[in-house]
Amino acid sequence: MRVARWGLICLLAAAVCAGTALAQPAAPAQVPRAVRVLVGFPAGGGTDAIARLLAERMREELGVPVLVENRPGAGGQIAAQALKAAPADGSTLFLSHDHTISILPLVTRNAGFDPAKDFVAVAGFATFVNAVAVSAATPARSLGEYVNWVKGQGGRASVGVPAPASVPEFLVRTLGERFTLDLAPVPYKGSAPMMAEMLGNQIAAGVASIPDFIDNHRAGRLRVIAVLGAARQPALPDVPTLAELGVAGFEDLPYYGLFAPVGVPKPVLDQLAAALARAIAVPEVRDRLTGWGLAVQYMTAGQLAARERAYTRIWTEIIRRSGFQPQ
């Protein structure tokens, strides 16, 4: 009898323990023990430098390794496809600007990813502008002088762009039409190889972001002669906008942000976003980003997603008017 009673007590105790365990709230989702940040362009370019600066600071904020992984090629398409295939646990992020997220799906028949379905915005951290620059061997010191120089070369010239079917390429085509020049956009696999050929005077002009150009502009190794956007840039106050020079339609500002695969738990996304917010609030980080020509501003996931949608709508119309057919 005592044995049976003791067995009953044990069963009741086990049931209580099991119920208590079931009643315990699940442990909150946490950032994985290591995070990789994909960059769709080669090492040495502006986007790569930005990613490495932020990764270093986010490592300190999160307390886990944050490593940059370059997946260059096809204007960021390879990196975007890698993000789509990554586990939805927060271990893989994609630091990207407008080209891969907003433009590439509009100009590619089969990009291999759909930002609206495959990605989720984590947070944005800056806007920026693209710029037109010429190599030091080119005598031009203004857009007007460059136009006259090209006309003196028979009206034909090659202009480097970091990726095919990009905003820089559409700008090159627009400049050719505006000034009655035969300007041929030459796409590279990112800004770094384009910059190498500009610095080696193998190509006379290029279009890329201000972060790509600014250090070499300040060193006199090339000259920025015009910037996009609605206003002159604090980092280059003496350089006029294209709108000032009579070339309208390029005033809307591109963006930089972090993206993750769809399905990452919201608590993890929130931790990553908070780490990014704290990183860009550090004065040294903010100063470096500003010095590279970025307008630093934190954007929540919702704000970044809304900006991406608006930018995509604008460029859908620009590309349609241009007559460009997806490749």
Image: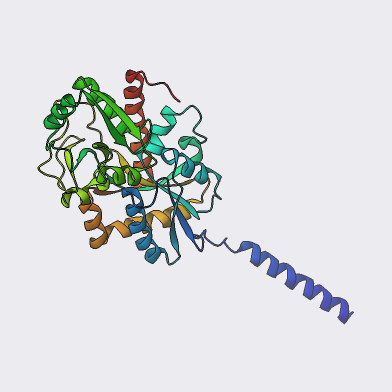
Determine if residue 244 is in view. no
Left or right of 105: which side holds 286?
Answer: left
Left or right of 87: which side holds 204?
Answer: left
Farthest-out residue, left: 238
User: Is residue 156 placed above or below 275 in the rendered structure?
Assistant: above
Q: Please tell me which residue lies in front, 285 or 188.
A: 188
Seen at 69% across and 70% down, the residue is: 17
User: Is residue 73 placed above or below 291 in the rendered structure?
Assistant: above
How far across and down, in percent of the image, does residue 175 sit? 22, 26
Count of labels in the image = 0
Seen at 33% across and 47% down, the residue is: 192
Left or right of 306: which side holds 117?
Answer: right
Q: Please tell me which residue lies in front, 147 or 288.
A: 147
Determine if residue 182 is in view. yes
How far across and down, in percent of the image, does residue 262 sit? 51, 44
Seen at 32% across and 59% down, the residue is: 279
